[in-house]
Amino acid sequence: MWFEGSLIVCISYRPVPMGVYLSSSCYCLIVPLVLSPADRSNAAVKRSLQSFSRGLCRGTRMADKGHCQVATPQCRIQKCTTDFVSLTSHLTPALDGFDVEFCKALRSYSACTQRTAKSCRGNLVFHSAVLGISDLMTQRNCSRDGPTSSTHPEMQSEPCNYHSRTQHAHTHPHTHTHTPPGYLFCGLFGDPHLRTFKDSFQTCKVEGAWPLIDNDYLSVQVTNVPVVTGSSATATNKITVIFKPFEECTDQRVYQAVTDDLPAAFVDGTVSSGALNHNLNENNGDSTGKVQALWISEHSPGRHVELHASYIGVTVIVRQLGRYLTLAVRIPEEMAHAYDATQDLQLCLNGCPTSERIDRGGHLPLPLPLPHPALGLQLQQPHGQGQSSHTHSHTAPDITSLGFSMEGARARCREQLEVQDIYFHSCVFDLLTTGDANFTATAFSALKDMESLHPHRERWTIYPPSSAHTSQPITWLLLLTLCALG
């Protein structure tokens, strides 16, 4: 029978202490199989495996008449599997260096199966594991030869790889278990919309140059310019990222992107930085004999660049959509909090200053009447009405003259954003504010970058606070748009 991708083979109707699964009537082997969905449903494959399982008892020593012992005390496949799980349980594909560490663990797993192969002859779990290792090595492009992982705490760490360094430092000496580091996410896109390390979502003015991150290891600064004449809404046209010197891993590197110039190199013309290492494989070394502690990968020329700093565990995604830039950053928590009192102005850490906020946690203090739909959404600030200290006293332009009505903006955003969360509402806000359809793709890309870098899936989706208190989310959008245009 099948259960969650495994074949459960019942061998005997007598409980055996060595069985990996025990029930009141029989004991079974739970075999994790690395098969495609098509193979799992293939009757011929099932018959072959069942026939193989029935043949396990042939030629083995009988513990009692009519019963066979499935595993012998010398077969250590369970220990090999347990070690592999221990080495990979903390790894996720989003982490820098995942492929390197996963390949090391697979090679260790393979070496372990080779050492116990003679005593595991005829063991279905063993043969399944060997096939599974081979398939995974092919899928991950792992070489058969190369460094392996060690389950012992005395293993040498790679000083220019944050994951390796912290694994070595945080491994418990008695249990050999590893406490993975915590990661934080920050993103900036659109007019601009900021998602802080604490998952606070804000819409800000912040015209000019502002620091998003400024700690002992990394500085990220953005420059924002007005999007529409007479509006307080801005968007990012310049991003500067400074990777600070770190031991022997890298000297200072500066990356700078501006509108229509998204380079695939640092300002000094280099594309990577690293340290000499004599324990290289094809995944973490280059032709110069260095481990790449810092490098740039270009995913779409002039449109999408990623900066990887494995020595501090940081990934930065920079994109250009339309005329403006977006930014997404993942950073270890301990690195993000390595700063002093002179570095407290960090938008990713503390959010925008109150005087720069267009929204107020989703609630705006302006009690403005909503226009009737028949008026074509010509949102005019009433003359003579008192203004908030956080907004300008300009008359708002006619939104329809910018190219989108409310329904038109919502329809356009629904083409790429199915869930009406904060990214959808930000998309609508940007279209109403600027009339620039490129902001639809901007919101969608920001959402996808967040999903690829944010470490906590349960926190991905954020809804506007007003949606929990009112049945008219459009009200929130209109007020937010008025505040930006005002």
Image: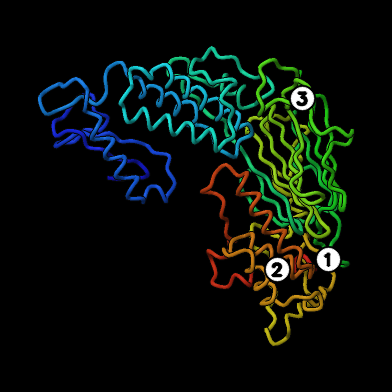
N-terminal-most mark, 3 or 2 = 3
Work out how far the residue at label 3 is from the one at label 2, CA to CA, in angstroms.
Answer: 61 Å
Q: Name the residue under label 2.
A: 366
Q: Residue furthest top?
A: 154
Q: Residue furthest bottom?
A: 374
The residue that appears at 72% across and 32% down in the rendered structure is 309
Q: Mark 3 points at which residue?
A: 287
The residue that appears at 76% across and 18% down in the rendered structure is 248
What coloring was used for the rendering?
A: rainbow
Q: Which circle marks residue 3 in the picture?
A: none
- Front of the two marks 2 and 1: 1
The quarter of the picture where residue 141 lies is top right
Picture coordinates of residue 110, whole percent (x, y): 47, 24
The residue that appears at 81% across and 42% down in the rendered structure is 221
Query: What is the secondary structure assignment of the residue under circle 3?
Result: loop
- Front of the two marks 3 and 2: 3
User: Which amino acid, mark 1?
Assistant: Ser
Query: What is the secondary structure assignment of the residue under circle 1?
Result: loop
User: Which amino acid, mark 2?
Assistant: Leu
N-terminal-most mark, 2 or 1 = 1
Q: Mark 1 points at which residue?
A: 231
- The 10 Å Cα crowd at callout 2, few under 14, some 14 to 19, many 20 or more, is some
Image quarter (top left, top right, bottom left or bottom right) of the N terminus = top left
